[in-house]
Image: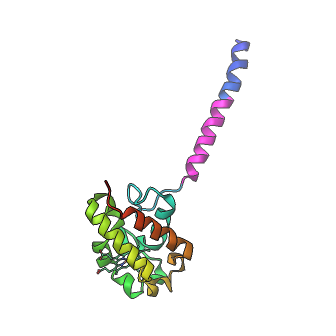
Amino acid sequence: MTTKTKISFPIACLVLTLLISSCSSSTQTTTPEATAPAKGVSSDAQVNAILESSCYGCHSTGGSAPWYAAVSPTYLAANSARSALNFSDWQTYDPQKKAEELKSIEQSVSGGSMPPGDYTALDHSARLTDQQKQTLLTWASQSALPAH
Ligand code: HEC
């Protein structure tokens, strides 16, 4: 009887510790935004993060701008932005549509028309640094190559 208690006490402690640590780690995992597509657009997490912070507000289902940026004219056109290019639907695009969009992304990002300036003037978090721009351009040009 006494031996049994001696053995089970440390085990109970261990189980408790495991439970507590798994509980606390699960509270740390952030719930993904409703705007994030089921699968990332790119296999490169860095690219996905840039798209999310700079493009999803207008180009994803359920994407929204912070209140102080929601008045910008291009944001008000976000419905047309989504019908032209919706990253939430990316996985459903066929290879040709993907290739066309990648080319268009490359052109608009390198030309500076996307993300739109009237919007990034208000939402600074959507601005692209030179490095982020480069990362996007490299992704768009490499992924646009025809798949064999
Ligand atoms: C403030 C809203 C907004 C943000 C942020 C934004 N866009 Fe746009 N985007 C638009 C609008 C509006 C259009 C024009 C849609 C149309 O043709 O009517 C557009 C069009 C495009 C097009 C052309 C799509 C097509 O098939 O005609 C591409 C490509 C594009 N955006 C890429 C991006 C990328 C990449 C980002 C992020 C780096 C981005 N956009 C961020 C609003 C936005």
How does the figure colour the protein chain or chains?
rainbow
Residue 24 rendering spot, x and y as whole percentages: 61, 47
Vertical order, 55 against 43 (above or below):
below
Instruction: Please give the name of the residue rendered at 64% of the width and 34% of the height, measured from the top-left corner.
Output: 16
Q: Quadrant of the N terminus?
A: top right
Residue 17 vs residue 63, the one in the foreground: 63
| Residue 126 screen position, x and y as percent | 50, 76
Residue at position x 55%, y 52% from top? 29
Q: Please tell me whether residue 56 is drawn above or below residue 46 in the rendered image.
A: below
Q: Residue at coordinates 41% horizontally, 62% vertically from top-left? A: 34
Picture residue at 38% right of the left edge, 73% below the top: 105
Is residue 26 shown in magenta?
Answer: yes
Asked whether residue 52 appears in the rendered view, the answer is no
The magenta region covers: 13-29
Q: Position of residue 9 (x, y in %)?
A: 70, 24
Tell me residue 36's x, y (percent): 41, 61
127 within the magenta span = no
| Quadrant of ligand 1 in image | bottom left
Viewer-nearest residue: 115 or 4: 115
Q: Is residue 4 left or right of residue 77?
A: right
Horizontal placement of 30 versus 141: left or right?
right
- Can residue 104 be seen from the camera position used here? yes
**Is residue 59 toward the left or the right of residue 18 in the image?**
left
Taken as a whole, is the magenta stretch helix, strand or loop? helix
Say which of 66 and 11 sits in front. Answer: 66
Looking at the image, residue 65 lies above or below residue 144: below
